[in-house]
Amino acid sequence: MLRSIIGSILCALTALMSFCVYPGSIDKEALQIPPLFDETKISPITDGLGSAHNRKKQTIAVATILSPLAFDEEKKSIKAELVSGLLSVYGLALENDAKYRGAIGANRAAQELQPQARSYLLPNMELSLGVAENDRDIRKGGLYRTMGQAGFTSEEMKVTVTQPIYHKDLWVQLGQAKNRIKKADFNLALARQELMVRVAERYFEVLRTTDGLTFAEAEKKAIDKQLQQVRKQFKAGLIGITDVEEAKARYDLAIAREIEAKTQIDNAHEALWQITGKYLPRLGPLGKRMQPVFPEPNDIDRWTQIALAQNIELAIARQSAEVARTEIKRVRAGHLPTLDLVGTHYREGNSADQYGERDTRTSSITLQFRLPIYQGGLVLSQSREAIHRHSHSQALEEMVEISRSVQQKTRDGFWKVRSGISHINALKQVLQSTEIALKAVKKGFYVGTRNSVDVLNSQRKMFRAKKDHADARYDYVLDVLRLKQVAGVLSKEDLVMVNGWLE
């Protein structure tokens, strides 16, 4: 009877429990997010001899703690001849950047919103079982009652199936779930674009600091050479001790700059390691193939229109505003009637007592109509709250603010790219002028018309011009990527383009 049914169900539950995964036996590999980037499809950058180097694929476990000690160990384990391009660095960041991996997890969680919302519109089946041991003591019997004590077992089983037919709020909730999934997809796309820009920024920061160290070492070497010449002239009685001390002071300052440059390059490498999980000693430098060009289209109003249509932050704000708007509908639906189809099967029985054994079965199908009449003003209050949230800062006002910010950033980015081209060309002329001036000053020093201080100052200007010109080229590349990001059109193809400029 029902007892045997209950026993069968308990056995089935026990069997299912044996397959459950407890905290002590969690499959850690199942918890890890699989990589979304196939590194095998990336062509590694070639070195000066034209030979390509394959690098080992290294992944970082979720539980790995990124500490300075781990960075030092990684630094020691890398072969110095490996050269990494922007695409390969981006591939490592896709696999190891914690912020981006977190965005992937959040997106996957959001994909479950629609199945959850849909489940409220599907049939809901519930089974309840009960077994009770009863002791009955009848001390006064009526006309047909038998006095005395009796023990018996009562059992009951109830199966209820409910199918929602009309629930306005549930249908609105399903639409909201779709909007929230779209918002989550936009958030993931935004995280991917932000990762592209962060990778490029940290990649070129390494190149920038590497140039700084190169220029600092070259300047120190040039000053040292000048110092030796000044000392020889001092010994020959051609110049005074002041020139020697000035050259010595410049040399000491060059040593300090070199030390500072080494610290900066270490910091830049560690920042890149933070998002890639790998120490990359050699990065492909920005070559002469990079020729700055005006934005395409070369129209600031057109770029603004593109940004208003495709900027991802603005798209996220639109989805938030839409969810807030439909929330008004969902809350107001609390005033509307609901209709459900309910099917019930009920079985009750007990073993023999004074009146014998009983077994009762009841089945019913009910069309259940509910109409909220008064709920203490709750629905009205919730409706006003939803209207305020949609009409003010949390929805429409926020979207207006983001729209204005996008327009301002787009215009600023457009002019930065355009002015960056002029800046690069101007600094190129400055570099050529300082190189010519240095040669002239050195000749004047040899013939006695210029002193050592003039030579040192001219050298300093030349190295400063070299660094400024290199920095302007890096800034131009980053400004191009940032302009495309704010316009919402940044993609991997842009990284492919930049990667083609590397040597």
Image: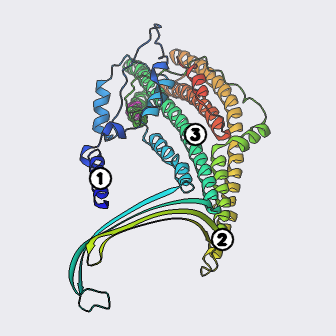
Q: Nearer the viewer, mark 3 or mark 1?
A: 1
**23 or 333, which lies in front?**
333
Looking at the picture, how far across and down is residue 10, in whole percent?
28, 55
Q: Which residue is mark 3?
A: 189
Question: Of helix, strand and loop, which one carries label 3?
Answer: helix
Mark 3 touches mark 2? (CB < 8 Å)? no
Q: Nearer the viewer, mark 1 or mark 2?
A: 1
Q: CA distance from mark 3 to mark 2?
A: 33 Å
| Sequence-earlier tag: 3 or 1 | 1
Spot the residue most to the front: 144
204 over 15 or under it: above or below: above
Question: Of helix, strand and loop, which one carries label 2?
Answer: helix
> Which kind of residue does numbered mark 3 sit on?
Ala
Q: Which residue is mark 2?
A: 383
Q: In percent of the image, x 36 and y 30: which residue is there?
A: 59
Q: Which residue is mark 1?
A: 8
Looking at the picture, how far across and down is residue 465, in whole percent?
57, 27
Q: Verify whether residue 256 appears in magenta.
A: yes
Q: Which range of residues does the magenta coloring cover?
A: 253-260
Q: CA distance from mark 1 to mark 2?
A: 49 Å
| Sequence-earlier tag: 3 or 2 | 3
Q: Verify whether residue 185 appears in magenta.
A: no
68 left or right, relative to 468: left
| Sequence-earlier tag: 1 or 2 | 1
Question: Of helix, strand and loop, which one carries label 1?
Answer: helix
